[in-house]
């Protein structure tokens, strides 16, 4: 079993969809299926079965997943430590930002300050899906992530620094038939979900921020128009092409896109976005970044 095979397996186990996992890994679906098949042959056990909701782990797959995640995490941690002490290798810091989100000025300034304070540091900032962030934090392949607060609860030993609090909004093409008001109620959003194609990330990611009526629809399949997207990138494409409306948070890229309207949902709880990290991460660049981000956030409060 190779490191890549472990990563492939964990991605499929997280997404429960071979096509979505292959897209995230930049692999052909046939290649990914073959690698999973090789793992099943090597260990003599079926790891996945397919049902009406997609792929799910078998009992053997559940055991395999727990062990592989632990092994992969240790391997990635070892690689990071060796990279830091390797001769001639630069200090590194890897930050993920939940895809399709415009990061706040405080976060941007903190990254710039980190580069100024530690000349020669190799800083990587990349967009990543919510599920990808969970896996990357869990395995230690990134140092920190700017993501939704609910995402952090899924990762053992994860800690976070609150960064922003935003309204939930409905995103729609300017030609979409919306009520003639600057804001929407949850009842109006639910009515749209009953009559038009409606996209959102799984409700558990948004937690209690959607009200009982809409939660009832998405949890009990009362509306055939509600679709769970695998990533915010998929949501963006559907709305941009005029194929439906979507529930997003306020700093979503759609809010800065010409031809797209963003209407706040007045009775939905706000979304908390945070800088998440693992408490056991010993990278000194992480400590420096969190300190700089804290300063920027405090300075922003003073300026406000």
Image: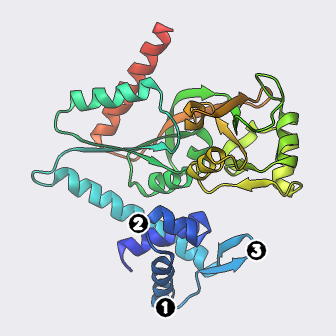
Residue 179, horizontal then vertical, whole percent: 84, 30
Q: Nearer the viewer, residue 183 or 39?
A: 183
> What is the number of the mark on residue 302?
none
Return the x and y of residue 39 as percentages of the image width and height: 47, 84
Farthest residue toward the top?
Answer: 303
Work out whether residue 283 or residue 275 is closer to the camera in this orientation and state it: 275
Residue at numbered disc 3: 52
Q: CA distance from mark 1 to mark 2?
A: 20 Å
96 left or right, relative to 250? left
Q: Secondary structure at mark 3?
A: loop
Locate residue 249, reporting x and y percent.
64, 35
Whether residues under marks 1 and 2 lie with C-beta atoms below 8 angstroms apart, the answer is no
Seen in the picture, residue 110 relative to 35 is either above or below; the reply is above
Q: Which circle's residue, 3 or 1, is located before the other in the chain?
A: 1
Can you identify the residue that label 1 sits on? 41
Residue beneath the point at 50% across and 64% down: 23
């Amino acid at each position: 079993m190779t490191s890549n095979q472990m990563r492939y397996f964990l991605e499929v186990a997280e997404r429960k969809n071979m096509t979505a996992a292959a897209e995230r890994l930049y692999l052909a679906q046939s290649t990914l299926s073959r690698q999973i098949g090789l793992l099943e042959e090597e260990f003599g056990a079926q790891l996945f079965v397919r049902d009406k909701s997609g792929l799910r782990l078998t009992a053997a797959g559940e055991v395999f997943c727990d062990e592989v995640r632990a092994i992969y995490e240790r391997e990635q941690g070892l690689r990071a430590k060796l990279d830091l002490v390797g001769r001639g290798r630069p200090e590194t810091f890897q930050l993920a930002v939940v895809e399709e989100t415009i990061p706040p000025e405080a976060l941007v300034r903190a990254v710039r300050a980190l580069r100024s304070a530690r000349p020669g540091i190799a800083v990587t900032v990349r967009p990543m899906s919510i599920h990808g962030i969970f896996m990357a934090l869990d395995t230690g392949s990134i140092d920190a992530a700017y993501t939704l607060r609910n995402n952090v609860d899924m990762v053992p030993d994860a800690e976070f620094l609150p960064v922003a609090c935003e309204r939930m909004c409905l995103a729609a093409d300017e030609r979409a038939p919306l009520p003639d008001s600057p804001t929407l109620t949850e009842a109006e959003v639910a009515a749209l979900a009953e009559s038009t194609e409606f996209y959102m990330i799984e409700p558990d990611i948004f937690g209690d921020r959607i009200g009982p009526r809409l939660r009832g629809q998405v949890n009990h399949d009362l509306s055939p128009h509600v679709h769970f997207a695998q990533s915010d990138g998929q949501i963006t494409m559907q709305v941009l092409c005029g194929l439906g409306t979507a529930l997003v948070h306020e700093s979503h890229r759609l809010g800065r896109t010409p031809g797209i309207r963003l209407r706040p949902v007045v009775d939905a709880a706000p979304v908390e976005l945070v800088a998440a990290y693992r408490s056991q991460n010993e990278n000194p660049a992480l400590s420096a970044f969190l300190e700089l981000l804290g300063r920027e956030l405090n300075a922003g409060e003073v300026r406000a």
